[in-house]
Amino acid sequence: MSEPRKNRTTVEIYGQQYTIVGTESASHIRFVASLVDEKMREIGGSNSSLDSSKLAVLTAVNAVNDLIKLKDFYERQEKEIER
């Protein structure tokens, strides 16, 4: 069985270039990177004293928090549909 083809896409996030390797399309990777960049700029704009490492961690915490909320919402919707 062949493995999915991996794409290499160079993106810029918060002024730094990164090469992302994955099976998603280049446009999807660029979209995700733009959302991360947007969130980092949003958080960095209201916390100008943060260094980029702390800013990245806060961005990750925000993203995971959003993911958990979406999963909880999805699970509640599934239970509601089952009723």
Image: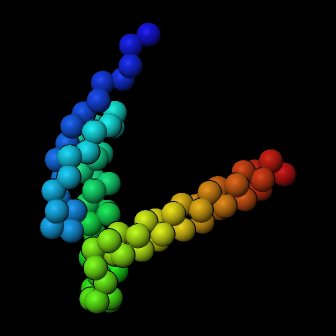
Out of 2 and 34, give the one closest to the viewer.
2
Residue 29 spot, x, y in % from top left: 28, 47
Q: Quadrant of residue 15?
A: bottom left
Query: The N terminus lies in which quarter of the figure?
Result: top left
Question: Could you tell whether 28 is left or right of 79 in the image?
Answer: left
Q: Tell me which residue sits at (28%, 39%) in the image.
A: 21
Q: Tell me which residue sits at (24%, 33%) in the image.
A: 7
Q: Quadrant of residue 16?
A: bottom left
Seen in the picture, residue 76 relative to 22 is either above or below; the reply is below
Seen in the picture, residue 72 relative to 83 is either above or below; the reply is below
Colouring chosen for the image of the structure = rainbow
Question: Could you tell whether 33 is left or right of 57 in the image?
Answer: left
Q: Quadrant of residue 39?
A: bottom left
Residue 52 spot, x, y in % from top left: 27, 74
Question: Could you tell whether 28 is left or right of 72 in the image?
Answer: left
Q: Tell me which residue sits at (20%, 42%) in the image.
A: 9
Residue 75 spot, x, y in % from top left: 70, 54
Seen in the picture, residue 83 relative to 1 is either above or below; the reply is below
Q: Tell me which residue sits at (16%, 47%) in the image.
A: 10
